[in-house]
Amino acid sequence: MTARVLYSLFLYLVTPLAMLYLLWRSRRQPAYRHHWHERWARYGAPRRDAPLIWLHAVSVGETRAAVPLVQALRQRYPDHRLLLTAMTPTGRATAQALFGGTVELAYLPYDYPGAVRRFLRHYRPAMGMLLETEVWPNLVAACRSHGVPLFLVNARLSEKSYRGYARLRPLVAPAFGAFAGVLAQHEDDAARLRSLGAREVQVIGNLKFDNLPAPELVARGQAWRAALGGRPVLLLASSRDGEEALLLDALARTALPDALLIVIVPRHPQRFDAVAGLLAARGLTTLRRSGWDGASTPAATVLLGDSMGEMTAWYALADVAIMGGSLLDFGCQNLIEACAVGAPVLLGPSTYNFAEVARAALGVGCAWQGQDADAVAARALQLLRDPAQCAGMREAGLAFAGAHRGATMRVLERLPTP
């Protein structure tokens, strides 16, 4: 019995747990109850009016990374439909906000053999692309048997993820080997992917550098800065569970400027209320973005970013940005967006999700890394008192982001004509 057969049997056995998981997640995010039929590839009548190119972006970060690629594909193949699949409601909502009706949206079905075959029969993609580290053994095998060229694009594989995949080598090695091509972010990613069986591996850089900051969001953040009347702003961007308390504790052990505005933007919207409760329990005067007009000066110590789609504006507002996901062992969130806006970046010890980007940013001086939250807090306050150093990091960040663009065109050059 092959590893993939055992894997498929396991999926069938845990189906009730998958349904319970969706219901459990729907307590905080009701959207998890929507479009269930798509997760098992149950559809209505298919469209056959134009050939289709399919991209899969699991959630918000991958969806945003796909923006320049989607735009380039629409320009190069105007007669093709584009399908963007996701796995999470926030990823799907982000795609809807970014692309509107210009792309078709659906959930990628769970990796049951029958479901992935129904998905391919319904949409009949001429070509497919999975972004970053999405490897589904039955889906990859079905694409190969149906003659659908499938590419792993913007591929990355951290050392931590590599060790996990290596333990499942009999299952994942055939999947990695069945891709029509693997387009990796960095040579280290490429080496790890080759070790797991991937063939036709090429290094093309990181698509996220091509995702230019939206001018209207940069202007919004600059307008917010003007409304603050010169107050220094320390941003905790895309924070994960536990990091808000960790940073606030570290800041409490320092001498904070009286006028300092702390901005906290949680990574996941379902945590907005929990973070608001944390701030209230600590007695911190807090204003939520949902209650701020953006034009008045907040009479608060903390501004809570409880909005979606405004991360670029928050970076444009900040004097210094601390990257969420790096203070605890979450691997760091995307620092490229902060550099592209010119926000000085501070990193905690955990950066494995963006290891190469972090290393390069540290090397050119647009980012700084501390061994713990206390070191990061101390460095943040030092930078807030040194505008010249902040300005130098801003310029270095803008230059760094600009120097690494071009991955989108390199992807297009390596794709077949669908």
Image (cartoon, helix red, strand yellow):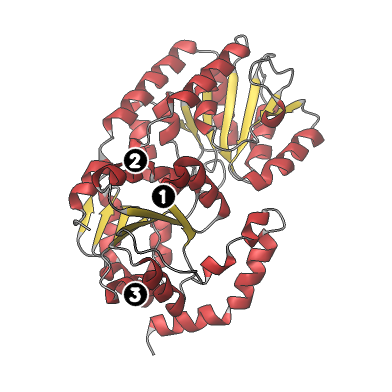
Residue 153 locus on image (x, y percent) = 31, 54
301 to the left or right of 34: right
Residue 104 locus on image (x, y percent) = 43, 54
Residue 180 locus on image (x, y percent) = 23, 64
Disc on the earlier residue, 2 or 3: 2
Q: Quadrant of residue 148?
A: bottom left
Disc on the earlier residue, 3 or 1: 1
User: Which residue does the numbered mark 2 point to in the structure image?
Assistant: 68
Residue at image x 44%, y 11%? 388
Q: Amino acid at mark 3?
A: Ala
Residue at image x 58%, y 62%? 35
**Looking at the image, which is closer to me, 324 or 310?**
310
Neighbourhood count class around disc 2 (C-alpha, 10 Å): few under 14, some 14–19, many 20 upward: some
Residue 252 locus on image (x, y percent) = 70, 27
Whether pointer 3 and pointer 1 mark residues with C-beta atoms closer than 8 Å, the reply is no
Whether pointer 1 and pointer 2 mark residues with C-beta atoms closer than 8 Å, the reply is no
Whether pointer 2 and pointer 3 mark residues with C-beta atoms closer than 8 Å, the reply is no
Compute the Cα span from label 3 to label 1.
23 Å
Q: Secondary structure at mark 2?
A: helix
Compute the Cα span from label 1 to label 2.
14 Å
Is residue 32 positioned above or below 37 on the image? above
Q: Secondary structure at mark 1?
A: loop
Is residue 324 positioned above or below 295 on the image? below
Is residue 391 visible in the rendered image? The answer is: yes
Q: Quadrant of residue 200?
A: bottom left
Neighbourhood count class around disc 1 (C-alpha, 10 Å): few under 14, some 14–19, many 20 upward: some
Q: Amino acid at mark 1?
A: Val
Residue at image x 42%, y 84%? 5
Mark sitting on residue 103: 1
User: Which residue does the numbered mark 3 point to in the structure image?
Assistant: 142
Disc on the earlier residue, 1 or 2: 2
